[in-house]
Image: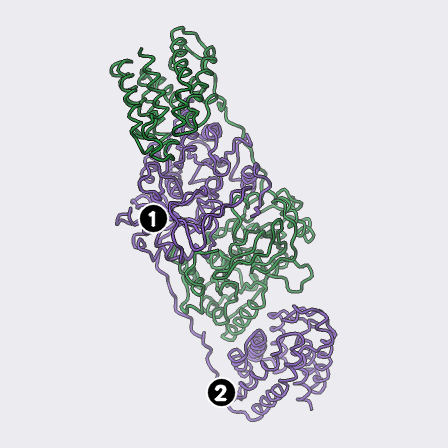
Chain colours: A green, B purple
């Protein structure tokens, strides 16, 4: 699978530069590429406790995406899935740490522990006040003495970040971070492996399988399980969490591991709320991609028992747009359908001349059925005649419920009938034609002028212009001439317009626009033919 | 490719419910599932112009993700890649439209035009003031009379949304929307097709190829081009845009079509700023997934010439967290590396006894090289002896630059030397041990107590506890006994601790934790053996 990179070596530095240039000036980096890749807030004055996190890249938006007011002060970025060096971490710490001190937030991987740990020692040797916490929220392996740090790290970033922003001391921020770490539990599931830039993709997970309990570096999950659907996947994940949760209210973080679509993540959110742990979940962060594993089509769920103060820290405003907010989980609010969705039927009325005229129009189209179908077969699926004839028959059958005596309502009523009886785009277009004409008639236009207005609306919505090889090529000149001179002249220009369509090689709207030009030439558009036929018969 | 869905039919309704439940009460939906899927703001009082958009699903976060204060009032969601029905659109319009009227923002697809168009007509028949604009920003086919509507739609949502929120009239909002549409140009590129839920994935794009000028419904791009790297891909896309851009300042929107990683999108952002059109780009929205095509690994770029008032509308706060903000494009700000990154070398000093003691320690480890390598070969890669011997030789060679007479500085200096001369985790761990010991010594602890403190730090950072089958099993009792009684007693407990490691079947830290228990049993841990050997020889 190709990827949008330029070279494996430049992947992280180019990504950081792209991020900084599009941060609106909120972010900067330290000098020292390519070894030192540290992203920092530009609005930092060292007056508060600094928070530094980081680790291997490939987890975007973590960690640089969470640098900003109310979250991290700096992120130290390693290569993809590789810890940054001691020097890089030390550079970050030295760059941001003032008298209030610095907290390092490190995920529990040997490389990160060691490099951040030694950097902390070296920073202390400079007299800086540096604490370090290690996040180990993964419960994939229940008895592992060294659980991995995964997406639950975001709880630490946000709560410690909000506290630090509020001016809390390093001791208090560290204690809160340790409390959050002690309470946070995470587990993930994936349907596929991830693609490391510049490397071939490992094809480890077979069809019908998912990995449960996986890390964020492409390592294999603890077990492969059968995969059926989203609800069952969420049930498997939440069953693991339920085993380690108490009955208190929790905040949950629903993390996209990178490759799941937003549609899938919303479905998973729905399944999460309905799951066995759903009743304990009061607040949610996400669903969103926060701690990813490149393009892995998977998700993780992190839970943390909510202490009284945490709601405020989690909800406090922060600058990084990668933080999706922390929101109350609420039931689906369903609003009643508005009145008027079912159109009010006009009061039927009788008007003999109108009934006869409508019937005559319909009969003309019914008589043309076979001819129009044959024409349509040249450029479409051969059903124009049947579609129009069917709608015409239905309209004749509906005459006794139409407001025949109320001409301003009649157009709208015909539009309604066509909506229900005539399928496809042409049905909607003719419904728009008549409904818009009714709209225009009710505001005082003459019946023909109202039809002209209806046609204008239909053209605007359907997008067909004169010369696009549609019924418009016959109908527009016909209505114009009908308004100006009369039915006889209208019939003449309708026929001329229809015949012209046979010379148009490139249809620009409607279905015929997908047809080869050679197939079209010499054949009149069936919609235009129907219009010409109607006007000619009415004029005769 | 399996996906996190439950059924093709329930995909959209479940996703909407998931979204609403995690919106913190900001969103609701209309009754009428499954046919009517309308997501609305709950804080809407109909006092301002309503904005209704929507279309087929599969473009998340568009459109429901952009419902909220300052953007859309409601989103009408169709099936994946299929227009919603007239009734669904009408329900949305009727539900939100007050005296100020409603603007429908529709992407230029026949189904959407017709269904939204007829719904608008029917709403007007109820006396509602409804306008409709059609977004046609795609320039993939330069002469197509009906260009598609793609990600540029977001400019319309944001600018019209901010204006409507400010109380602008329907006429003014509509005029602004039409102005934005007239100026917006978009084009996309993808490395892969998308996976429609419940359908097999089409494998259309060969290795080494990319599609340029594609829509957002999985339809084929206008052309397949050779794919080399991100910079060349961005150059191809921006070349198309350059041909239709003038020299005025523009805002650009960098959209993830769904399947590109954030790492890739940041690299593309970097390439965009460096591209031929980069100098015209003043503001950027993204990079972010805004108008996706499910999981398509691709991106699109939309540009719009910036009028004076647009900066404020684009930057105005809005509720939907899917809107990534609109930020100034700025150069990469590079901050100087902090002082002290290169540790200040302590002033060398002479101290004969210390030099002799250090040399003796090093020589003991050098002499143990072969034995330790042999032990390590049982559980590791057989280099523990060489690693320690190499570091010992280097330390002997460094004696004349060490502060031998300043014992509080000496530990730190040894830590620095080990950082540079001893590779791997063990080098970092021993560097932490000595650096932390130096830190402790400088705050007044005795030399042995400082080593105990150094060991505690090393354990905390490395994660090894007593009984985990590491050097700690010998070193911790030895230091405790050294502090309490003396070197002879220390040697005895070191040896006992080392021998005990041979009985530990499950290593819990370090590399041996990955080794089969049967391979470990009966073999002393080489690190613990090194410690025991050192104390025994020093005591003898």
Q: Which mark is residue B272?
A: none
Q: Nearer the viewer, residue A526 or B96?
A: A526
> Alpha carbon of mark 2 to alpha carbon of mark 1: how far?
59 Å
How would you rate the neighbour count of disc 1 (Cα within 10 Å): few for under 14, some for 14-19, many for 20 or more?
Answer: many
Q: Chain of mark 2?
A: B
Q: Nearer the viewer, residue A531 or A58?
A: A531
Q: Nearer the viewer, residue B450 or A359?
A: A359
Is A355 placed above or below A368 here?
above
Is A457 placed above or below B498 here?
above
- Asked if badge 2 and badge 1 are on a common chain, one would say yes
Q: Nearer the viewer, residue B207 or A221?
A: B207
Q: Does residue A385 appear anywhere in the picture?
A: yes
Q: Does residue A54 appear anywhere in the picture?
A: no
> Which residue is depicted at the point 29% across and 45% down?
B308
Q: Is A533 left or right of B25, judged from the image as shown?
A: left
Image location (x, y in percent) of residue A195 = 51, 57
Determine which residue is flagged by label 2: B401
Secondary structure under tag 1 reads strand
Secondary structure under tag 2 reads helix
* Residue closest to the far bottom: B352
Of circles 2 and 1, the one toward us is: 1
Image location (x, y in percent) of residue A51 = 50, 62
* Residue closest to the far top: A352
Image location (x, y in percent) of residue B33 = 56, 32
Determine which residue is flagged by label 1: B251
Q: Chain of mark 1?
A: B
């Amino acid at each position: 699978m190709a990827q949008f990179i330029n070279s494996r070596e430049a992947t992280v530095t180019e990504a950081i530069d792209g991020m900084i240039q599009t941060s609106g000036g909120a972010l900067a980096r330290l000098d020292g590429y390519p070894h030192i890749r540290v992203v920092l807030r530009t609005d930092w004055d060292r007056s508060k406790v600094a928070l530094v996190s980081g680790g291997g890249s490939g987890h975007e938006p973590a960690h640089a995406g969470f640098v900003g007011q109310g979250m991290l002060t700096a992120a130290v970025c390693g290569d993809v899935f590789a810890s940054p060096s001691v020097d890089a971490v030390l550079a970050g710490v030295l760059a941001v740490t003032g008298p209030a001190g610095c907290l390092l937030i490190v995920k529990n991987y040997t490389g990160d522990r060691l490099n951040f740990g030694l950097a902390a020692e070296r920073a202390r040797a400079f007299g800086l006040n540096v604490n370090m916490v290690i996040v180990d929220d993964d419960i994939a392996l229940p008895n592992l003495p060294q659980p991995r740090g995964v997406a639950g790290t975001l709880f630490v970033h946000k709560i410690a970040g909000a506290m630090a922003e509020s001016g809390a001391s390093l001791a208090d921020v560290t204690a809160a971070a340790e409390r959050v770490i002690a309470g946070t539990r995470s587990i993930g599931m994936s349907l596929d492996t991830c693609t490391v830039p510049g490397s071939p993709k490992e094809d480890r997970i077979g069809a019908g399988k998912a990995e449960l309990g996986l890390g964020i570096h492409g390592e294999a999950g603890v077990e492969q399980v059968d995969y059926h659907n989203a609800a069952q996947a969420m049930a498997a994940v939440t069953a693991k969490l339920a085993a380690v949760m108490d009955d208190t209210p929790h905040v949950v973080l629903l993390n996209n591991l990178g490759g799941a679509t937003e549609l899938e993540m919303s479905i998973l959110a729905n399944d999460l709320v309905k799951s066995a742990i759903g009743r304990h979940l009061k607040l949610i962060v996400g669903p969103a991609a926060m701690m990813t594993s490149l393009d892995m089509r998977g998700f993780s769920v992190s839970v943390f028992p909510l202490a009284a103060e945490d709601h405020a820290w989690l909800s406090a405003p922060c600058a990084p747009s990668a933080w999706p907010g922390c929101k109350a989980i609420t039931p689906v609010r369903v609003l009643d359908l508005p009145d008027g969705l079912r159109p009010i039927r006009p009061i039927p009325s009788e008007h003999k001349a109108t009934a006869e005229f409508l019937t005559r129009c319909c009969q003309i189209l019914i008589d043309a059925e076979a001819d129009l179908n044959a024409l349509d077969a040249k450029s479409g699926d051969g059903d124009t005649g049947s579609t129009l004839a069917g709608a015409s028959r239905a309209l004749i059958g509906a005459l006794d419920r139409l407001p025949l005596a109320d001409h301003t309502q009649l157009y709208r009523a015909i539009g309604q009938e066509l909506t229900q009886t005539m399928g496809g785009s042409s049905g909607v277009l003719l419904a728009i034609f008549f409904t818009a004409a009714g709209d225009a008639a009710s505001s005082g236009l003459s019946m023909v002028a109202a039809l002209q207005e209806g046609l204008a609306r239909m053209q605007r919505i359907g997008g067909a212009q004169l010369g696009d090889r549609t019924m418009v090529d016959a109908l527009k000149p016909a209505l114009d001439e009908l308004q100006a001179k009369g039915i006889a002249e209208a019939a003449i220009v309708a026929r001329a317009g229809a015949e012209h369509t046979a010379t148009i090689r490139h249809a620009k709207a409607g279905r015929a626009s997908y047809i080869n030009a050679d197939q079209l030439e010499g054949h009149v558009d069936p919609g235009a033919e129907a219009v010409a036929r109607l006007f000619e018969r009415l004029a005769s």
